[in-house]
Amino acid sequence: MAFTGKKFPSISVPAMNEMGDTIRINVLEEAMKNKKKVLLFWYPKDFTFVCPTELHAFQAALPEFEKRNTIVIGASCDTPEVHFAWLSTSKDNGGIEGVTYDILADSNRNLSTVLGILDTSDVYFNDELGVEQRNGDYVTYRATYLIDEEGTVFHEGINHMPLGRNVNDFLRLIDAYSHVQSHGEVCPANWEEGKTAMTANRDGVQAYLSSN
């Protein structure tokens, strides 16, 4: 199910914060009560290989997201206790020590099921037992959601497990959406902050094309 243009699901999920406390987070409420944008990124599993590179990359870019009035939240289907163990493990040992943003622990898969981002390729029906079973780990793809101050999703994307994300892509998307919010203009292909945008009419398009 696509959520772009719709409110993000209002579901509270346990999370681990940098202090080692288990808290509960409702992403929709985080956006609306704080009047901030939210970047929520899902990754398959703690203590893996590509995943820590992404978490450290988002941490390194955290000041840039903060400049853009954006909260960063990570998420997987691991438990809060596993998140805490990973946060307590040094970067040199494959850990994410130093990550300061909250990480959702959707171990009951309530939110990831609603979002439709779980890997279901190994699900099959066991005729003998009469139940649905799984061969795989039933974890999430690398899904990313950008949510505005009203709780509306303005970008969603899903990568397969082996494909790490480029953090700068999301900074560009936030800049573009903020420009639309502030100026009412639309942002053409490859638009970046400081470049010419255009108005959504024939004259505006022609003016943009003429200047480029």
Image (tube, grey):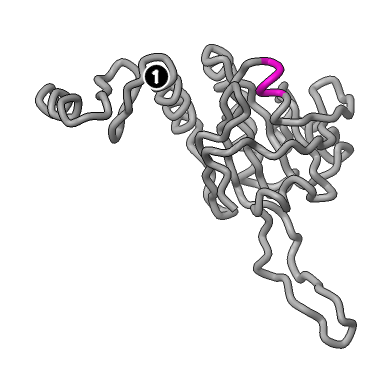
Q: Residues within 10 Å of mark 1 (few under 14, many from 20)?
A: some
Q: Secondary structure at mark 1?
A: helix
Identify which residue, 185 or 78, lies in the foreground. 185
At 68% across and 29% down in the image, what residue appears?
73
Q: Is residue 13 magenta?
A: no
Q: Position of residue 135 (x, y in %)?
A: 76, 71
Please identify the residue farthest to the left as the structure is shown: 210
Label 1, on which residue?
179
Instruction: Please identify the quarter of the rendering in which residue 209 is found.
Output: top left
| Boundaries of the magenta span | 30-34
Identify which residue, 91 or 158, lies in the foreground. 158
At 28% across and 32% down in the image, what residue appears?
188
Q: Position of residue 171 (x, y in %)?
A: 47, 25
Asked if residue 136 lies left or right of residue 70, the reply is: right
Say what amino acid the circle numbered 1 marks: His
Instruction: Please identify the quarter of the rendering in which residue 191 is found.
Output: top left
For the C terminus, the quadrant is top left
Please identify the residue farthest to the bottom as the structure is shown: 128
At 72% across and 54% down in the image, what residue appears?
139
Identify which residue, 100 or 114, lies in the foreground. 114
Q: Position of residue 148 (x, y in %)?
A: 56, 26
Q: Position of residue 204 (x, y in %)?
A: 19, 25
